[in-house]
Image: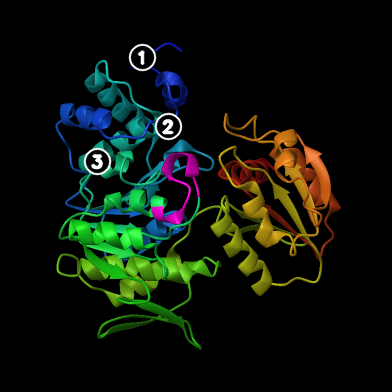
């Protein structure tokens, strides 16, 4: 594709970036660091929080953003992937970046990179850094894209680094066991800086790397805790205790994510005012799309990005805690690098009918129907209600099959959720 000119739209830039680098994923910091240095080595903010982990990253970023903004600070957040618009990835003071700002940032990056090739994600990370610096945000919250050690976000030395959870995902890139994956994720930790671990049972390698680096570890279940109460829940760390309201986000894991975010702010309390009222307000106000998001009632329609076994277990726990009179009907699709059988295993006893959808038209990594069913071969509890060439068709069939007392659950990938949201928005 021809290189975009300065007059091209955001869509033109993104289409070009998707094919500009030989590989969609090319982990390593050497190329992006050189371009960043050519840009003048800009820092995104006086204070930076990096958020890595297998699941819970997006929600933890949302809690941090809401808590910090409730405390009067200007916050920039960089997250991925997006659901409906690329602009969602870069937020400044609670608003998505506009097209013109992103295009201007891409133009600067293009001018600086010379003959250095960058991936789609690396362009986005650099654009976020430039925009946060330009708008002089007080705090930048950067979500790791893949792994940690070699991810573009790790270009920046974070003042606090968070690893939310560690489980099996992206094994082709990060390793085939939790121990290997944890070592990659621990790469965002820094010497003599706080390392917040939200996983109650972290692999030993996560702790080993933190110890080798000399990071200041704050670990869930040991250095901080969260427990539900009759009126909400309680966060504790040492002599500090906060009585807090329940999050608006419904999943059982959201209390853990909120507790992890609070612990990051607690570690920065000598630089950021410790404001329990702002923390409580942030917990109530935090929202992130596609996480047990209810879109309709009678029949109920819920979307969740659950795209790996750990996230599927959380979804199953929520279903069990929220029974309905009728059936659960699933709309499901997945990407090629996912453990499809592992994702479905926790949900087999909860879902009565499955509508499978191909994602090969939505992403180069999307599974076709034939490949999806091949991976499910032998699942005797698995009742296929229909095979569909796209998310929209699967949603239509599932909705038609559902009675008023039923619940339609669309999950398995950001692309599934995006397809449903796009359909609902257009309706």
Measured in 3D between alpha carbons, the distance from the residue under mark 3 to the one under mark 1, in whole angstroms, is 27 Å
Q: Position of residue 39 (x, y in %)?
A: 18, 29
- Describe residue 196's horizontal placement relative to residue 168 as left or right: left
The answer to whether 273 is drawn above or below residue 61 in the figure is: below
Q: Earlier in the sequence, mark 3 or mark 1?
A: 1
Magenta stretch containing residue 171, yes or no? Answer: yes
Q: Secondary structure at mark 3?
A: helix
| Mark whose residue sits in front, 3 or 1 | 3
Which of disc 3 and disc 2 is earlier in sequence? Answer: 2
According to the picture, the residue beneath numbered tag 1 turns out to be: 5
Residue at left 44%, top 70%?
Answer: 256
Mark 3 = which residue?
155
Residue at 62 percent across and 69 percent down: it is 317
Badge 2, how many Cα within 10 Å: few under 14, some, many 20+? some
Instruction: For the C terminus, give its image quadrant.
Output: top right
Which region is colored magenta?
169-179
Name the secondary structure under disc 2.
loop
Left or right: 7 as drawn, with respect to 305? left
Percent coordinates x, y for residue 300 in the rendering = 73, 60
State whether residue 316 is above or below residue 31.
below
According to the image, label 2 marks what residue?
A: 25
What residue do we see at 40% from left, 43% from top? 145
Is any part of residue 396 visible from this angle?
yes
Instruction: Give the numbered dot on residue 311.
Output: none
Q: Residue furthest bottom?
A: 230
Observer-side mark, 2 or 1, equals 2
Task: Give the x, y percent position of residue 183.
Answer: 34, 52
């Amino acid at each position: 594709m021809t290189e975009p000119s300065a007059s091209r739209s955001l869509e033109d830039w993104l289409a070009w970036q998707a094919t500009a680098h030989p590989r969609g994923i090319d982990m390593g910091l050497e190329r992006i660091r050189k371009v960043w240095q050519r840009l003048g080595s800009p820092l995104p903010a006086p204070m930076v929080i990096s958020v890595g982990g297998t699941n819970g990253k997006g929600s933890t970023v949302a809690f941090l953003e809401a808590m910090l903004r409730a405390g009067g600070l200007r916050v920039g957040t960089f997250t991925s992937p997006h659901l409906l618009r690329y602009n969602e990835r870069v937020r400044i003071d609670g608003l998505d970046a506009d097209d013109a700002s992103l295009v201007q940032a891409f133009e600067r990056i293009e001018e600086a990179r010379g003959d250095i090739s960058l991936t789609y994600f690396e362009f986005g990370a650099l654009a976020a850094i430039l925009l946060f610096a330009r708008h002089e945000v007080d705090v930048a919250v950067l979500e790791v894209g893949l792994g940690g050690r070699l991810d573009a976000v790790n270009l920046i030395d974070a003042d606090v680094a968070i690893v939310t959870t560690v489980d099996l995902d992206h094994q082709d890139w990060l390793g085939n066991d939790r121990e290997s994956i944890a070592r990659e994720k621990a790469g965002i930790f820094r010497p003599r800086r706080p390392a917040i671990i939200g996983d109650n049972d972290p692999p030993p390698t996560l702790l080993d790397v933190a110890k080798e680096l000399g990071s200041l570890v704050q670990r869930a279940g040991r250095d901080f805790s969260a427990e539900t109460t009759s009126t909400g829940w309680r966060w504790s760390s040492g002599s500090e205790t906060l009585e807090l309201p329940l999050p608006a986000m419904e999943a059982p894991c959201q209390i853990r994510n909120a507790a992890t975010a609070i612990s990051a702010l607690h570690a920065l309390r000598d630089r950021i005012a410790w404001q329990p009222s702002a923390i409580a307000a942030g917990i109530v106000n935090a929202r992130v799309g596609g996480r047990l998001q209810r879109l309709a009632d009678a029949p109920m329609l819920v979307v969740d990005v659950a795209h790996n076994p750990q996230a599927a277990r959380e979804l199953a726990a929520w279903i069990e805690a929220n029974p309905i009179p009728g059936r659960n009907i699933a709309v499901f699709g997945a990407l090629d690098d996912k453990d499809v059988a592992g994702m479905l295993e926790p949900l087999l006893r909860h879902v009565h009918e499955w509508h499978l959808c191909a994602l090969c038209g939505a992403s180069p990594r999307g599974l076709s129907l034939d490949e999806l069913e091949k991976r499910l071969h032998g699942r005797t509890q698995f009742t296929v209600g229909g095979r569909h060439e796209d998310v929209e068709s699967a949603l239509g069939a599932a909705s038609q099959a559902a009675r008023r007392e039923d619940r339609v659950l669309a999950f398995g990938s950001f692309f599934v959720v995006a397809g449903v949201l796009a359909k609902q928005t257009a309706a």
